[in-house]
Image (cartoon, rainbow, N blue to C red):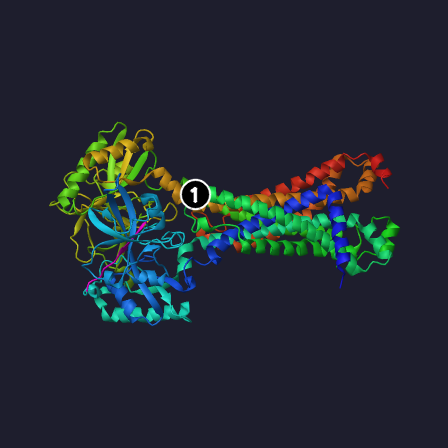
Amino acid sequence: MASMESWWQDIRHGLHLLSRNRGFTVVAALSLAIGIGATSALFTVTHALLLRPLPYPDADRIAILWQRSPGLGVPQDWFSIGQYLDIRADNRVFDEVTAAIGASYNLTGQGTPERIDGVRVTSSFFRLFGASAMMGRVFAAAEDTPGQAPTVILAHGYWQRRFGSDPSVIGKTLSLNGNPYTIIGVMPATFLFDKEVMPAVNGIEHADLLLPLPMGPTARANRSGEDFNIFARFKSAVTLATAQADMDGLAGRMKQQYPANYPANGGLTISVVPLLTQVVGDVRLALYILLGAVSFVLLIACGNVANLLLSRGAIREKEIAIRVALGAAHGRVVRQLMTESLLLALISGIAGLAIALGAIAILHHAGPATLPRLREISIDLPVVGFTILITTITSLLFGLVPSLRASRVDPNSVLKEGGRGAVGTRGLGLSHHQLRRLLISAEVALSLVLLVGAGLLTRSYRRITEASPGFDPHHVLSLRVALPGQRYGTADAVTTFYHQFEDRIRQIPGVTWVGANYLLPLSSVALGWEPIGVEGFQPKTEGDGLIIASSGYISQDYFRAMRIPLSKGRFFDSHDTKGTPDVVVVDEQFAQRFWSGQDPLGKRIRQGDDGPWRTVIGVVNDAKEYQAAGEPPITAYYPLEQIPVPQRFMVIRTTGDPLALTGPVIAALHSVDAELPAFDVATLEQRLHDSLARRRFATFLLGIFAAVAVTLAAIGVYGVITYWTNQRNQEIGIRMAMGAEPAAIRRMVVQQALAPVGIGLGVGLMAALALTRLVNSLLFGVSATDLVTFVTLPLVMGGVALLASYVPARRASQVDPLVALRQE
């Protein structure tokens, strides 16, 4: 085993060589630092989102349950109270089950009116999540029953923000929707009911309040109102598969016990989803794609450094030959060269960690707010360990082959050739030049895969932004208003309030149209699903019998305010009020699905199985109510004058900057009711922009990685061709002395790049065809085998590579033959 002294000699010698060859050291270290930094940053995000457990005891045993009905076309749905009680009582796999439902309240009596989000939970919620109050107490089992005094628990952040961390807050009251609630506890700062660590409950992504969820003795018979989330914790040793099998059996028993509630075409499936999987959501696939992309960047960086080391090794062959001739063992030479590689990797690793820290800081500042667990993303010990690991691995990747290749020189041939044996000498079955060409092919192939992936996502994002959402988002201010039932308990009171409010808004200069909808496009509560019946519709298959549609409850000017065009018939007007014939407006998809080739006007639909039949009076263009990407669902719109819901999104079309009217609109609200808060204020343009934030960010990152990869590959081509021309300087000088034209020299040099670049493009194209199918679910309006992308980008990659080879080719064609011939 080597002594410490000999190791120290290797280290000192390696540092001396790196400092003496500063140009080589800077280029190699920078290439590796970019690869290591980007990889470490992506691993940091991956670790925070996918590997770090949620901040609850036994978090890996906690799951969220979803009701999935195959015939409905709804990916996930909530449960009724009766279903929750069935699951709690009849399961065999959970040691704790709890229910929760989101609720928002108007807070008054505490200064400026405020809209505040809360979640109603059963007392088992705190046991399931291993949570206790920092001050006061949590809910007792008795508070799960009706008739108890109203109580509330404050989230730690809200306690600090609203009450200034007042320690005497316990026992005080909050006026929520006009009712007094006694504060009984404050949760610790470590417990967050936030989308970053907890799935949204009925659209509530951040809860400042926790309230009890009482259930009466007849609750189990309640099979309607499927609005409740269910969380459960596995018993020890129970697996996800076992839990799912138990829920499958329970769903079957529920369908047998309550056949009227689960028609055959709707069915019932209870899905068990690990809590972490639910929190991360659809980020997982995009994150894995980006992690694979950045790994390609690291491999390309390693290939570049390996090329540099091969070139440097060829230059040092005479030095190594002398050492071998003087008795140095091959293992000793390899160790010295590997030590130099390890030192280079260490320098690169430190610089890469700095790059990763900068990237994480930028992510915190500019990353999309929709990215889950964003605040938890930080450089920690696992990330530092990962950086050390990849630093070590990269030192082996880029250093081993050049070291072995350089150590196997033949001292006799090298010393006889005067150091020029690098061109033809073979080791490991390949010459230096062949190894470098092989690395170039690999770099070009990896770069092309990234470039194609980035190109597909970019074209997809462009298609999304160019596609019309079905409404005009420009110059529209939106905000939400919710009326408390205590003061607005009748339909007439609700209608009167909104008439007065809309009239006050219309008086504001710059306002052109005012509309309202119970749900607003692209909001956090953007889509309302409801079963509907279509008169005379005969399903083609059993699964078509139960129809689910998106429901909009709108004012008569909503379509005008949103600029959703009318295709046929008419909009709602002042005659469509309570007591008049029930009417409905549908979108074109709805009309096409059920009345293709027929006039939809005069046809009838109804909500559920027992709602009144409503006559179709109009057809409007399809609007993307839920998400900018993808096809919108079929939608039915109902007049708010006939169904006066107390909570509404107001949409106000203006002639100028809509945000400039925020103050006047809120003043108009308070002129009607000074105790009502306006909340969720934003322009439609901002909502549309925010809805694409995650997709835009992933596209941007992949584009950055592709650009870095192409740049590194170009540098690699440039380095190889530069080395090749330097080695053949004499040959080029002779050719020029014998009359060769500069253009012929340039062609000869560029041709040296054609073979490895061509091979790389071919391999990369085949790999891209196979791998880009992974991004298919992220694409919109673009095929994973898009012809434009697969034709254009290989040409771009080839052009960049040839340009990188042309620079040294041009330099070679300008060499002075006399100088070149005198170099030996």
Q: Where is residue 13 drawn, in percent x and y?
A: 77, 50
Does the image show residue 95?
yes
- Give the mark count: 1
Of the pair 695 and 449, the residue shown nearer to us: 695
Does the segment drawn in magenta span residue 684?
A: no
User: Which stretch appears magenta?
Assistant: 208-216
Q: Where is residue 264 drawn, in percent x and y?
A: 26, 66
Q: Is the residue marked by circle 1 packed among few (<14), some (14-19), or many (20+) residues within 10 Å?
A: some
Give the quarter of the figure containing the N terminus: bottom right
For disc 1, the marked residue is: 463
Compared with 805, 390 (above or below) is: below
Residue at the spot x=47%, y=57% of the render? Answer: 50
Compared with 493, 137 (above or below) is: below
Q: Amino acid at mark 1?
A: Arg
SS for dot 1: helix
Does the segment drawn in magenta span residue 209?
A: yes
Determine the image quadrant of residue 261. bottom left
Q: Where is residue 544 drawn, in percent x and y?
A: 28, 59
Residue at the spot x=17%, y=39% of the render? Answer: 497
Does the image show residue 541?
no
Determine the image quadrant of residue 60. bottom left
Q: Is residue 781 left or right of residue 91?
A: right
Q: Where is residue 490 drawn, in percent x and y?
A: 14, 46
